[in-house]
Amino acid sequence: MAKASMTFAVEFWTPDRAAVALGQLTESGVTQRKRRKGMVTRYARDMRCGGWKLTHQAIAFGPNGDLIDGQHRLAAVVESGCSQEFLTVRYQSGGASAAALATTDIGGKRTVAEVLSISGTLDQDGARDVVAVVTALRMLLDPAARPDASPEEVRGAYSAHETAILWAVKALPRKGYAAPVRAAFAFARSVFPEKTEEFAALITSGEAPRGSAAQTWHRQSANGGFAVMGGGAIRVQVMLRALRLIRAHVSGEGDLTKVYSTQRESLDWFKAKMRKRPVLVALAGAAE
């Protein structure tokens, strides 16, 4: 019988042990793809919050102990300071090891939406829209939040306010209402559900009673005020602008002559109201 080309075992990896393996990778000269700092940090965040799970996806070593797959996961163990269990494969021959290295990471990477729909967290049809709204909402409420949220981070934020997000995705069509706009409405609805739904119905129907906040909305929209072209700062500005007009409708201010998108006054106003209605408090607290 031919000798098995590899062995499998679930092994416990401490930060120190992971650092040694990564150090050996540097010394061995084995060619790996460039380590992505953002990916390592994202994995580390999941490890710190207990979101990293043992799966069939292994880290792998060649016959001389050279790491051939798993550098990002081991680097995340080091960065997070959290020990993890990994299925660990050890190749017994140089030929098998070289073949594995040549064919690793050539498949298509799953998106966050695909991961969450496959796991049953989200319906497949609307998963992409939901993830986009959650990502925007996290950026609004937590200045430190990154746009490349991991599946676990998205799952946690979505679970905290599922009803509001699903409503926003359904009530506001994608065309004309980008994810940051939907995120602003989801946040506002969690505090003032009736008034927020009323305003959404007004602007999506095309109605704009004279002297109303809806009139301001249509004017801003026609001037590109809710267009999302740019990075995170632009998206936050769009959300703040949307919140200002939702606030105007909720409080009965009427048509506004000026809308300042760089001021977080309306966000703070909604947060203050929200503290009297304990909805989304945990998520909003991240921005304090």
Image: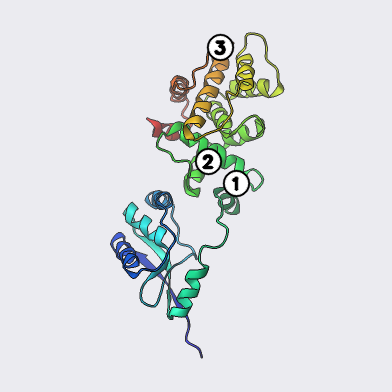
Q: As drawn, is 86 to the left or to the right of 107?
A: left
Mark 2 and mark 1 residues within 8 Å of each other at the beta carbon: yes
Measure the alpha-carbon separation of dots 1 and 3: 38 Å
Which structural element holds mark 2? Answer: helix
Which amino acid type is marked by label 1? Leu
Which amino acid type is marked by label 2? Tyr
Q: Quadrant of residue 196?
A: top right
Residue 216 locus on image (x, y percent): 60, 15
Q: Which of the two residues, 275 or 156, is positioned nearer the viewer here?
A: 156
The residue at the point 57 percent across, 28 percent down is: 185
The residue at the point 39 percent across, 78 percent down is: 63
Q: Disc 1 marks which residue?
A: 122
Residue 73 locus on image (x, y percent): 41, 59
Quick one: label 2 or label 3, which is nearer the N terminus?
A: 2
Q: Which mark is residue 158?
A: 2
Which structural element holds mark 1? Answer: loop
Crowd band around label 3 with a 10 angstrom C-alpha radius: few (<14), some (14–19), many (20+):
some
Q: Which of the two residues, 190 or 286, is positioned nearer the viewer here?
A: 286
Quick one: label 1 or label 3, which is nearer the N terminus?
A: 1
